[in-house]
Image (cartoon, rainbow, N blue to C red):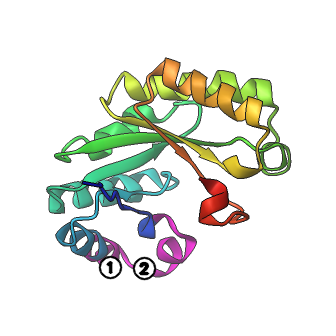
Amino acid sequence: MRNLIINDITLCTTLAAEQLSFREKVQAARLLGKMHVSQITLPEMKNHKADALLARTVASVITDTVLCAHVKYDGSDAQEVYASISTAKHKKLAVALPTSQAQLEFFYHLKPAFVTETVQKGISAARALCEHVEFVAEDATRSDFAFLCQAVEKAIAAGATTVTLCDTAASLLPEEFG
């Protein structure tokens, strides 16, 4: 038997963040829960009061679905983020960082050595609060393989229970990604 895990990121998309009302976001989460998606991922908190209210509300309307919330990569907001999803029956914290040289330097202005150190901080802070912690390696398909392996190893050593490798650039076909 094969398991199909569906991680819905609808609420993370720019379109949803900008164009859906609070009520529509909650309604979307409720419908996703009824469809039995495996996980609903919330976006990184930017407006802490509004985003925390959304997270608490979504946590109250879903029952069998994992609610995943993003923590800043250094873990500085881990306690606040965890508090917003703490009432969810199934919860997970996620730390996302790019692992490709292109995204590291041009979008985040970070160096690889800083990333591996920071991954450990973020994952450790999240793991101290939550049993399930996900490391999301963004743009993994364009990453230097040795560096990607090092970042994943550091994340696992810090307590990540799930690792997600993203093809952020959408540059590979499924058989190439595998």
Q: Which residue is rendered at x = 22% and y = 72% of the image?
A: 35
What secondary structure is the stretch in magenta mostly built from? Answer: helix
Q: Where is residue 16? Give x, y as percent.
A: 47, 75
From what the image shows, is residue 74 above or below residue 54?
Answer: above
Membership of 23 in magenta stretch: yes
Residue drawn where x is 21% and y is 65% of the image:
36
Reading the image, the residue beneath label 2 is 20
At x 52%, y 54%, the residue is 46
Report which residue position mark 1 lands on: 24
Residue 2: quadrant of the picture = bottom left
Crowd band around label 1 with a 10 angstrom C-alpha radius: few (<14), some (14–19), many (20+): few
Q: Position of residue 104 (x, y in %)?
A: 78, 43
Residue 90 higher or lower than 175, as above or below: above
Instruction: Give the left or right position of residue 61, taking residue 112 as reference.
Output: left
Q: Is residue 176 above or below residue 30?
A: above
**Viewed as shown, does residue 105 lie left or right of 85?**
right
Q: Are marks 2 and 1 in contact (CB under 8 Å)?
A: yes
Q: Amino acid at mark 1?
A: Glu
| Relative side of 104 to 57, left or right | right
- Magenta span covers which residues? 12-27
Which residue is nearer to you in this view: 13 or 150?
150
As for residue 168 lying within the magenta part, the answer is no
Q: Residues within 10 Å of mark 2 (few under 14, many from 20)?
A: some
Q: Would you say residue 66 is visible in this rendering?
A: yes
Please tell me whether mark 2 sits on a helix, a strand or a loop: loop
Quadrant of the rendering where the N terminus is positioned: bottom left
